[in-house]
Image: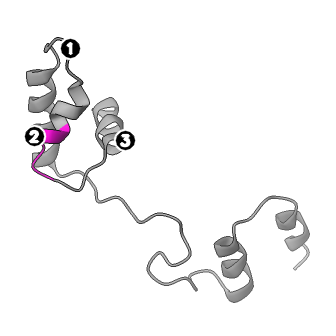
Amino acid sequence: NKKVFVELLFWKSPAAVREMTEGYGSLQGGEGTGRSRVPPWTPQEEQELRDLYWRYKEVEGEDVIAAILAHLPAPGRTRRQVVKQLVRL
């Protein structure tokens, strides 16, 4: 394959190189990736996030995101995920 030379000019992770050599789709279930997939936000979770944001956004001297995380029913969410979803909303 003549185009492999161009691919080698760019930095590749070990997982990407393995896929190139063994065929795409050779990694099973996120194997070789540094992080797992983030579960998508359900409409109910998004509504709860909106409600919690409007409830805690006016509180003086308190971290809004920390308050939301403390009252969010889904315990597996990180601060970064919550902030990213709030920006997206």
List the residue tagged with mark 1. 61
Is 30 rendered above or below residue 75?
below
Q: What is the x, y in percent for residue 39?
A: 29, 60
Q: Which sits in the foreground, 24 or 67?
A: 67
**Residue visible at 48% across and 84% down?**
28
**Residue visible at 14% across and 46% down?**
45
Range of residues picked out in magenta:
69-74
Asked whether the beta carbons under mark 1 and mark 3 sit within 8 Å of each other, the answer is no
Marking on residue 89: none
- Amino acid carrying label 3: it is Arg
List the residue tagged with mark 2. 71
Q: What is the x, y in percent for residue 65?
A: 24, 31
Asked whether the beta carbons under mark 2 and mark 3 sit within 8 Å of each other, the answer is no
Q: Quadrant of the N terminus?
A: bottom right
Q: Which sits in the foreground, 83 or 64?
A: 64
Q: CA distance from mark 2 to mark 3?
A: 16 Å
> In the visual, does 28 lie left or right of 68?
right
**Residue visible at 62% across and 80% down?**
24
Mark 1 vs mark 3: which is more N-terminal?
1
Q: Residues within 10 Å of mark 3 (few under 14, many from 20)?
A: few
- Amino acid carrying label 1: it is Gly
> In the visual, does 45 lie left or right of 11?
left
List the residue tagged with mark 3. 80
Residue reaching furthest front? 61
Q: CA distance from mark 2 to mark 1?
A: 17 Å
Q: CA distance from mark 1 to mark 3?
A: 20 Å
